[in-house]
Image (cartoon, rainbow, N blue to C red):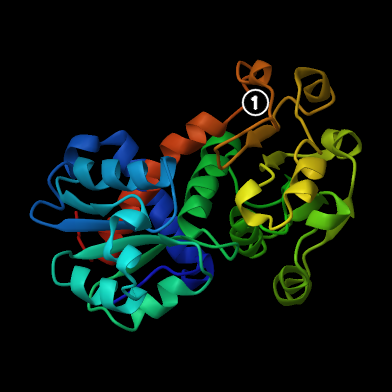
Amino acid sequence: MRHLLDIMDFSVVELQELIDCAMDIIAQPKKYAETCHGKKLATLFFEPSTRTRLSFEAAMYELGGNVLGFSDGSNSSAAKGESVSDTIEVVSCYADIIAMRHPKEGAPLVATRRTGVPIINAGDGGHCHPTQTLADLLTIHRELGRLDHLTIGLCGDLKFGRTVHSLIAAMSRYEGVRFVLISPEELRVPGYVINEIMEPAGVPYVEVRSLEEAMPELDVLYMTRIQRERFTNQEEYMRLKDSYVLTPEKMKTAKQEMRVLHPLPRVNEISVAVDDDPRAAYFRQALNGKYMRMALILKLLEVTV
């Protein structure tokens, strides 16, 4: 039995297999319409979510399966003090596969020790978010036709941004990838990401403060919001929240083939005036998340089509 806790749980070959499966789902949706008939997905979201939870639910419904679960920890027995371990062990009696989000890093790992069904990490604190990375990979593949030889700019909250950490880990395994890390000093990429992921892989990177200076060299710009919920000091949040705002004016210096990604939700970091730019791929990225989650569910349930 396989779980997905971290994007590094899957090899590059397996990631490509998921992309190929997602592309086939896009091309032949009817072929997959009943592949999970009789199967149940439990979505256990101890932390709020819109896109991730709904895309998991849409993915399972489009595969012909069913969904149960909760969208807020306060609506579960966790509010009564029940442990994650006990919740998982009980839900495992009712579901064939579980997607869980939790504010504490490592909670999905704890879950794997008390379950007989596959666990999917749908985001654990500021640690990682592997299924968002699956959406990112499919988006880059569909938009640019490759996952190698790319200069990727990551902009905004690189300290707490779990989507950033997962994307760096995934893309560090592809040839010719270079990172431009754009953030305030206070929100730099954590040292462990540099020391344990990028440097051992020999991935070139630079850390800069200016989005405008970095823009002309980028193939992908991955914008992130400054996350209020990760700050204990709200004054610091207010000072940093509008550090970077992408506007049509700033897009003028970007390559015509450059693509803008964002895991969403956005707040102020991308002007709505950018939405009509064909290089803005973030809503297509959200749709790609559904296709990759469909492919992932099939893989973890060992369903063959």
Residue at x 65% of width, y 47% of height: 228
x, y percent for residue 292:
39, 48
Q: Inspect this view and state whether residue 237 appears.
A: yes
Residue at x 29% of width, y 82% of height: 114
Residue at x 41% of width, y 46% of height: 52
x, y percent for residue 32:
20, 44
The image quarter in which residue 146 lies: top right
The image quarter in which residue 165 lies: bottom right
Is residue 238 toward the left or the right of residue 43 in the image? Answer: right
Q: Is residue 297 above or below residue 2?
A: above
The residue positioned farthest toward the bottom in the image shown? 113
Crowd class of label 1 (few under 14; some 14 to 19; many from 20; radius 10 Å): many
Is residue 277 toward the left or the right of residue 252 in the image? Answer: left
Q: Is residue 70 above or below residue 287?
A: below
The image quarter in which residue 73 lies: bottom left
The three-letter amino acid code for the residue at tag 1 is Arg
